[in-house]
Image: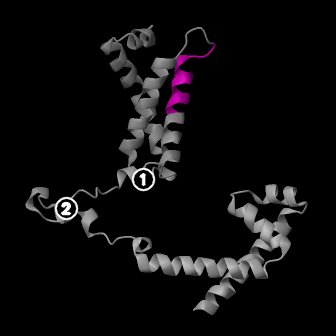
Amino acid sequence: MLVLRARNGDGRSLDALIRRYNSFVRLKASSYFLAGGDSDDLQQEGLIGLYKAIRDYRVDKDTTFRSFAELCITRQIITAIKGATRFKHGPLNGYISFSNTPAGQDPDSGDCTIGDTLAASPVHDPANRVISSEGLEALVGVLGASLSKLEGEVLSLFMEGESYDFIGDRLKCDAKAVDNALQRVKRKVGTHLDARG
């Protein structure tokens, strides 16, 4: 069987299968759209699906290789489209190294790197740290004095990362009451921050 010979490394059998299914791959790829890609990318994905079909096809199952190959090709194309729409690899594909010099200059020229030119975080500035800690203390003081018992408990559990449903079950109220309490807390925080200017 052609599939078994291709799986065992016979290049001629693999070429014959690729020629046989190439028009189906092209037809299937043309009926889909890949964001940020073109039809050649989808054809490549379809050929990967064909390769997986050759690799995974089992003769003892009650299906023809043609049906199995069409399923694998279609699934591979759809998986590629879903992956592209999630931008799963976007951060990796669009990164810029901080160790590169601006405008591709020679790193041995003594010029500063991109990492050197970025402004430091304002949190590391001692003056900003004091202002931030004073602001946080004032906010905690206001919240402690102005929040109801329910609002304080809801805020505490929410800050621990708990869900509305969990908080509601824990405090014996529904998720809407939890949401309302958090909205009141946000308004009180907003009023405090506006007053501080």
Q: Which residue is found at the position 33% from the left and 11% from the top?
A: 10
Image position, residue 146 (x, y; %) = 78, 82
* Vertical side of 52 occupied by 12: above or below: above
* Vertical side of 181 occupied by 78: above or below: above
Q: Earlier in the sequence, mark 2 or mark 1?
A: 1
Image position, residue 182 (x, y; %) = 76, 72
Judged left or right of residue 86, residue 176 is: right
Secondary structure beneath disc 2? Answer: loop
| Type of the residue with mark 2 | Thr
* Vertical side of 110 occupied by 48: above or below: above
Q: Nearer the viewer, residue 19 or 183?
A: 183
| Type of the residue with mark 1 | Gly
Pointer 1 residue = 90
Q: Nearer the viewer, residue 121 or 183?
A: 121
Question: Is 109 in the magenta?
Answer: no
Q: Which residue is found at the position 83% from the left and 76% from the top?
A: 148
Q: Quadrant of the C terminus?
A: bottom right
Q: Quadrant of residue 8?
A: top left
Magenta-drawn segment: 62-74
Question: Disc number at residue 148?
Answer: none
Image position, residue 9 (x, y; %) = 35, 12
Pointer 2 residue = 101
